Image (cartoon, coloured by chain):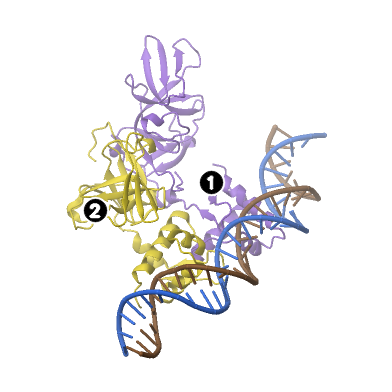
Chain colours: A yellow, B purple, C blue, D brown
Amino acid sequence: MKELTARQAEIHDFMVCWQRDNGFPPSQEEIRDHFGFASPNAVRSHLALIAKKGLICLNAGKARGIQLKTSTLSEMGSSDKSIPIVGTIAAGEPILAEQNIENLLPIPRALFGGGELFALHVKGDSMVQAGILNGDVAIIRKQSHVENGEIGAVLLGQDATLKRVFLTSGSLRLKAENPTCDDLVYNESSIESPRVIGRYQGIVRTSGLGSVL
Amino acid sequence: MKELTARQAEIHDFMVCWQRDNGFPPSQEEIRDHFGFASPNAVRSHLALIAKKGLICLNAGKARGIQLKTSTLSEMGSSDKSIPIVGTIAAGEPILAEQNIENLLPIPRALFGGGELFALHVKGDSMVQAGILNGDVAIIRKQSHVENGEIGAVLLGQDATLKRVFLTSGSLRLKAENPTCDDLVYNESSIESPRVIGRYQGIVRTSGLGSVL
DNA sequence: ATAAACACTGTTTTTTATAACAGTATATAA
DNA sequence: TTATATACTGTTATAAAAAACAGTGTTTAT
């Protein structure tokens, strides 16, 4: 079977995420909105190609009739029971490389929606307005995009931080949930642009207990 | 949570099967076809009722916008290691009586300091300033006193709520962590005085995931 | 006896989503 | 250089699905 092109993979990823978050697949128009296509046919032709490569099944004439092949979905879910807590992320290494893992959080992944999950220690008060405090452990699902306005884990240098992410016409805006923090804005052209590494799924707070986490 | 009626259960079963077989939920018309309803409204009203009972989530205006909530918790099994989530507390019954237990949170007690733990659904915004949001699951250690200024679970009537507790010279002051909420003050003599039932240990937040917790 | 919840019928309107057409521009390989 | 595949724009038509009314019986609890 032929492999997906980069663009096709992006679209496929989006559909997988959407399905997991919503319980049903995106409509062609929702895909179009997300990628900003001017024409509905852009989506149609992409879907046809992805379908030909066997990763989805299209049900003609049905609204939202995109069936994601289950193999793809289960691939995304990791079999390990515990959620790894990731510390500083060594440059060039994948996020979940062993040397980045600080600890393991022994709670069921299903609680946080399943998928490829990891956790981060929250440092600082930049997200207090979202109820995320210094010392909390944030649960993140690994993915390279988030919906506009969602909270994402963003890699800035070696550290991952949580910010509300807005991607608009070539510029990336990272908004802290704290009135005293200014937004960070990056242009697509800039060399040192941050990378979205996951989507905020929730937190576990054991603060004040001197816990082992 | 109220139980489904026989008819509602039939319809819910159909949706679960359809979702499993097709990867996306049925449309209202497909449900109608299957059951042979003469009116589309038959489906609509059933869905509304099933949604009210929490087994599905309806996305208004979206084709096929039925989100089935899989009972993640029951799939995960219930061991005695799990932390029980307590709902309304029947008068006179001990807090952890079986009829008070809504669900089980399958995470290790050691994470929250061990001891006799239970959990509460947080309702309302009275503790936002402490980073405790509506919908969070608060972990409580059962005990009948807390240190001055600590956050405690307090039984007011049938419901347990979180408040910062101050006990000074015969009067009990319950302070919400929200500037718009007034403190509650009780004298020891008052008949309807609230009872401290535990100490706040932390939270688990899975909000926005449509989880069953 | 009377409400309240349940399980529907019947009709019309509006919104959402897919389909079908005809094109353009670019890279890559034969 | 000539296909061939990819990655789209742009327009219009049509089907699918949801929503918004106003109703009718029936059971169940008070």
In whole angstroms, how far apart are the C-alphas of marks 1 and 2? 45 Å
**Front residue of A28 and B97:** A28
**Front residue of B39 and B170:** B39
Rendering coords of residue B192 (x, y %)? 50, 16
Q: Which chain carries label 1?
A: B
At 61% from the left edge and 52% from the top edge, which residue is drawn?
Answer: B47
Rendering coords of residue A54 (x, y %)? 41, 74
Q: Is residue B2 left or right of residue B124?
A: right
Q: Which of marks 1 and 2 is in front?
A: 2
Q: Is residue B177 above or below residue B86?
A: above
**Front residue of A169 and B102:** A169
Circle 1 packing at 10 Å, graded few (<14), some (14-19), many (20+), is some
Q: Is mark 1 on a helix, strand or loop?
A: loop
| Quarter location, residue B81 | top left
Q: Which chain carries label 2?
A: A
Q: Mark 2 points at which residue?
A: A192
Q: Is mark 2 on a helix, strand or loop?
A: loop
Q: Quadrant of the image for the N terminus of chain A?
A: bottom left
Q: Name the residue under label 1.
A: B54
**Front residue of B55 and B57:** B57
Q: In this view, does B97 lie above or below B27?
A: above
Rendering coords of residue A89 (x, y %)? 20, 51
Q: Quadrant of the image for the C terminus of chain A?
A: top left
- Amino acid identity at mark 1: Gly
- Amino acid identity at mark 2: Glu
Q: Residue B46 carries which label?
A: none
Q: Is residue B175 visible?
A: yes
Rendering coords of residue B96 (x, y %)? 43, 33
